[in-house]
Amino acid sequence: SQPPQKLYEGKAKILYTTDDPLVLLSHFKDDATAFNAQKRGRIEGKGTINCRISAALFELLEANGVPTHFIDCPEAGQMRVRAVAIVPIEVVVRNIAAGSLCRQTGIPAGTVIPDPLVEYYYKNDDLGDPLLTRDRLFLMNLATPQQLDRMHSLALQINRVLQEFFTRCNITLVDFKLEFGCDRRDGSLLLADEISPDTCRLWDSDRADPQARILDKDRFRHDLGNIEAAYEQVQARVLAQFAGP
Ligand code: C5P
């Protein structure tokens, strides 16, 4: 058997090889970055929390017909995943206007988006993850029309499942980012990366105060404090949905 090798280190995770070339081990880090890594810090306990939340949401999505790279969690903060070739597109789904949508369009923050918006960003730090159009994305050969249609319909399906789930947690799913990859086994598209308070905007439905209700990485981005408590709150509410009666 081969010793595990570091395959890739990203901003929030390290990927290791395993004995099986079709399986990788993802180690979730406590490191936090924002604004294209111009802001850096640590959120204590974030790695294990994001790993647990992601695992629970991937299992939920699999049960609802969404194929994911998730296999299991051998240890806290570690996830075994299927090896994929990542599609370098960040797919963002928005239910409520926030963040870059407001900055770029002037739409007031908090505006409800009746037909969820699906957007594509180029996953490229040097270029600052620019917003893409469908035609630009094809020009750049980032995906085929079939792959893009599949990512679009999966993104909306994921949004329906997650919105319904987070509503039961008393959490409003404002927006989130997805990454997809092509399965090394057969080339089929799998949901990859993570789904966590790092990659979603999540508002506590029990609170009206626009700062107090934030349960996601915006607390880190905008120095709102109580980051760990917010992530723990999301974890507790998500896991409570899977606990027995
Ligand atoms: O910044 P923006 O408003 O475009 O972000 C939309 C959603 O995508 C947010 O939930 C944010 O956390 C997520 N996102 C991400 N990784 C990025 C960019 C955005 O997880 N590189």
Image: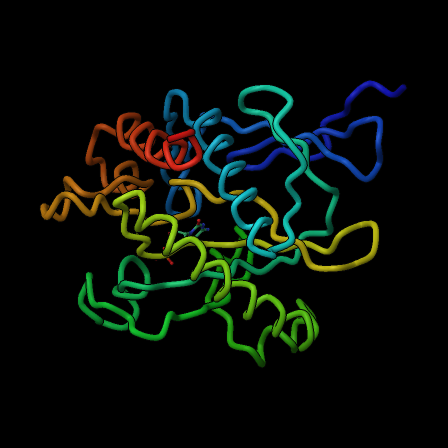
Q: How many labels does the image show?
A: 0
Q: Which residue is drawn at 10% across and 48% down?
A: 208
The percent coordinates of residue 191 (x first, y second) are: 61, 52
Query: What is the quadrant of the C terminus in the image?
Result: top left
Q: Which picture quadrant has residue 142?
A: bottom right
The percent coordinates of residue 154 (x first, y second) are: 56, 64
Q: Which residue is drawn at 50% across and 66% down?
A: 120
Q: Residue at x 18, y 43 (%)?
A: 213
Q: In this view, does 242 lie to the left or right of 24?
A: left
Q: Which residue is drawn at 9% across and 46% down?
A: 209
44 to 20, vertically: above or below = above
Q: Which residue lies furthest to the front in this view?
A: 245
Query: What is the quadrant of the N terminus in the image?
Result: top right
The percent coordinates of residue 12 (x first, y second) are: 51, 34
58 to 122, vertically: above or below = above
In depth, the one of 178 and 236 nearer the eye is: 236
41 to 153, vertically: above or below = above
Q: Is residue 108 left or right of residue 135?
A: left
In depth, the one of 43 and 93 nearer the eye is: 93
Q: In this view, does 78 lie to the left or right of 113?
A: right
Q: Which picture quadrant has residue 161?
A: bottom left
The percent coordinates of residue 160 (x first, y second) are: 43, 61
